[in-house]
Image (tube, rainbow, N blue to C red):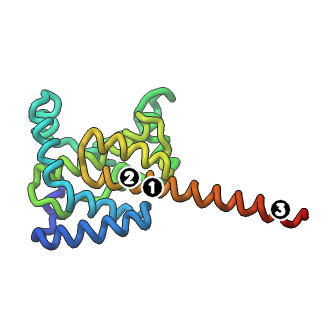
Amino acid sequence: MSGLAAHHIKTTLAQKILLGTGSSLAALVNPYRGDMVAVCGETTACRSLENIRSKMMEDVTGKIILKEKPRISSETMDLKLLRALPESTLGRQYVKMLDKYNITPDSRLPVRFVDDIELAYVLQRYREIHDFNHLLLGQPTNLRGEVVVKWFEAIQTGLPMCWLAALGGLARSVWIRTLMNSNMMLESLHKKEQQN
């Protein structure tokens, strides 16, 4: 399980509700707070993680992943080999993304608030493949790209945090666009007023 149990913090239902609510609000205010997004995901995911595990158990590859519990980390990924792959490969694009954003396969926080160790692994695995979703969908890591990836992940996983991020990101994008359009209209009116 490679350290997941070592990071576990036991919490009551009331504590999970408090952590989930607080982290959700913090993540909506500042979507770049990865720590708050992580806590929100962990404290709201129980049923969804059970559903994901059930689907994995129905699939041959899913069963193997749950049995072997492979991790995506600097220890398991040969980044030098990936850098030597042809430009058009997923591996090469993955290391280019790591380099561009100055991150590593170890940049994802460990799961702390999921009590079932196998479900904690499922959530950790979700985190570790998130960057591959960006690559497969051709999305950057800006707000628009994260919103697109979260919509995809929400539909695929049903994780409440993904739905919250997708809806919150969409609302934030609309709000930003509205402010920009309002600002452009005000500048235009101001210019017209100055001309008169």
Label 2 with label 3: CB-CB less than 8 Å: no
Residue drawn where x is 17% and y is 29% of the image: 61
What residue would you read off at disc 1?
A: 171
Image location of residue 146, percent across then percent down: 43, 49
| Position of residue 152 measured from the top left corner of the image (x, y, whole percent) | 35, 40
* Marks 1/2: CA–CA distance: 6 Å
Q: Secondary structure at mark 2?
A: helix
Q: Earlier in the sequence, mark 2 or mark 3?
A: 2
Q: Quadrant of residue 45?
A: bottom left
Q: SS for tag 3?
A: helix
Q: Amino acid at mark 1?
A: Ala
Observer-side mark, 1 or 3, equals: 3
Q: Circles 1 and 2: CB distance less than 8 Å?
A: yes
Above or below 192: residue 143:
above
Judged by depth in the image, the label closer to the viewer, 2 or 3, is 3
Marks 2 and 3, Cα distance to the nearest angstrom? 36 Å
The quadrant where residue 28 appears? bottom left
Q: Position of residue 185 (x, y in %)?
A: 71, 58
Q: CA distance from mark 1 to mark 3?
A: 30 Å
Q: Nearer the viewer, residue 128 or 44?
A: 44
Secondary-structure class at tag 1: helix
The residue sitting at 83% across, 62% down in the picture is 191
Residue under label 2, please give it: 167
For this rendering, which residue is in front, 110 or 151? 151
Most extreme residue toward the right is 196
Read off the residue under disc 3. Answer: 191
- Residue 91 location in percent, x, y? 41, 34
Pointer 1 local density, CA inside 10 Å: few below 14, some 14–19, many at least 20:
few
